[in-house]
Every structure is written in structure tokens, then in C-alpha cells.
Image (cartoon, rainbow, N blue to C red):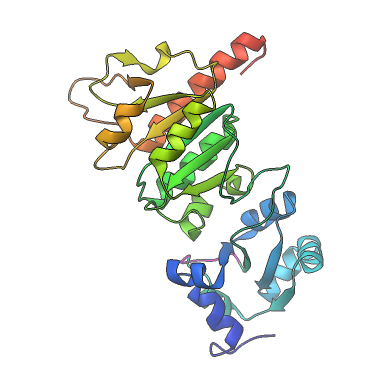
Amino acid sequence: MLTSLQNSLVKQIRKLHSTKERHKQELFLLEGTHLLEEACGVNYPLETVCCTPDWQAAHSSLWEEVCSRCDRAEIVSKEVLDVMATTVQPDGVVATAKRSVGASPTGGVRQAQLPFTGTMLALETVQDPGNLGTMIRSAAAAGASGLWVSKDSVDLDSPKVLRASAGQWFRLATAVTEDLKATVQQSQQAGMQVVATLPSATLTYWEVDWRKPSLILLGNEGAGLSANLAAIADKQVRIPLSPGVESLNVAIAAALMLYEARRQISQELGVRS
């Protein structure tokens, strides 16, 4: 059992708390039983798994499964596990995995390109990991086909993003784009309608025909969507607000439109949404 805080593996995993080190090592950190179960559920390859003796005793079947999937498995003391984790009260297990993997039919793929089809999100300079994780969760729940983020957004594999996604990070295809404007234009060339949210728009979001392949364009939490991106959208929509309310949280705005799209598509197919 690993008990030393000076162990090289402990130091390596602890470094994954920082964006710079995740990029350098090409690894990210999974924390907690639920995320580990979700990773196993889609056969996401694991590098290292570390757990406390108490966690191993309580999750013997899962431990056997992850041991068969990962390159290295270690039992560690609670003190070591606490140092490895970013959460205040970790539940006893952490793991590391590659930041990029090959295509998977179950989704959860970090890749350079996504197919322009169905309903997608494109996010500009989203900074809050809780917001990004929530949008990933909502997009997966609503049956979206994927999510783009601009390169100046919070890291897709930030530990807080993974936790906020409630494990849906592994089930939704996502990608970082170096040039969001070019990506939006590519989606238009592929036949998608681009819908931007603006408080000054006259069209409400439920007046859009979401049965068409659609890219929902959303901006930064404080600054909103930049003018140059809003200008190339095919449609600009607003979400009606009661007097005195300035705006909605970006993750809630995304969920409203994703589910309106799901409602319209389900209605056309004659199935319950």
C-alpha cells in the first residue's frame, strides 16, 4: 500500500490538478465512484487507478473490473488519496486517463472534428467549469449530437467539469476548436442552421424550427456572444424574461433550447419526449 506523500506516482497525479500539467502529461483526473463507473460503462481506457482499503472492500466488483482495464492499480492510504484528489471529501478512489482517445460508438470522444448533424452546442469563451459540465450533462440528456468549445474556454477535462457533467462527459462527443468562427461557418456549409441567443432579438427560441439540423451558439457568462459570431448566425433568438431580470445562466439557456429542439423532433416523430 502506498503511504508516502513523496511517492513519484502520488506527485504525478497531484500535478494533474493544474491545466498545464494535464496538457503536459496528456492525462486527466477522474475522481469518485460514479465517474469511474461511467468510464467503465463506455469502455474508456484508464491509465492508473488508486483507492483506499475501505473503498476496495466496499466496491470489490468495480475494483476487479478497473484492475482488468487499467495499466496500474494501487491501494493507497486515506492521506495519500486526499492529496491526490481535488475534492474536499473524496469518496476513496481516483483514476487517470488519456486526454484523447480514438473514436468510440458510445460517444465521450475528445477529437478534433465532430459530424455536423442533429442538434449541437457551440460555446464561446465559457469560463465556469460548473456551467460547462452542466451543459454537457444537459446536451447528453436531450440527445444532442455533440458540443464544441472555443480554445479559450475552460478545459473540457477539468476535474470540476467532469463532476458537473455527472458522468455524461463520457457519453457526449465533444471537441475544442481553434477557430470557432470557422467551425460555425463549416456547420453552415454542411447544411446546419446556426441559432444565436441575443437579448435584443425579436424571435423567441420556441419560434425556431428545431427539426432542422441546428447549431446553438452561446457566449461567455459575463460578456455574452461576440458581435462577429452573432452576425453570422442564421437566426437570432431571445429567451423571454420577466421585468427586472437581466439574463439567464448560460447553462439554463442551453437546456431550454436543447429541450425545445427535442420536443419538436419528438413531436414530428410521434414519440414521447
Picture quarter containing residue 143?
top right
In magenta stretch: residue 212: no
In magenta stretch: residue 90: yes
Picture quarter containing residue 237?
top left
| Residue stretch in magenta | 87-91
**In front of the other: 203 or 34:** 203
For residue 70, above or below residue 210: below
Give the residue displayed 61% in from the left and 15% down from the top.
266
Give the residue displayed 61% in from the left and 87% down from the top.
3
For residue 48, above or below residue 245: below
For residue 142, above or below residue 108: above
From where the camera sits, is residue 165 visible? Answer: no
The dominant secondary structure in magenta is: loop
Q: Does residue 59 appear to the left or right of 229 in the view shown? A: right
From where the camera sits, is residue 89 visible? Answer: yes
Give the residue displayed 71% in from the left and 60% down from the top.
45
Q: Position of residue 11 (x, y in %)?
A: 53, 83
Q: Where is residue 5 in the image (x, y as percent from the top left)?
A: 54, 87
**In front of the other: 171 or 7:** 171
Give the residue displayed 47% in from the left and 69% down from the top.
17
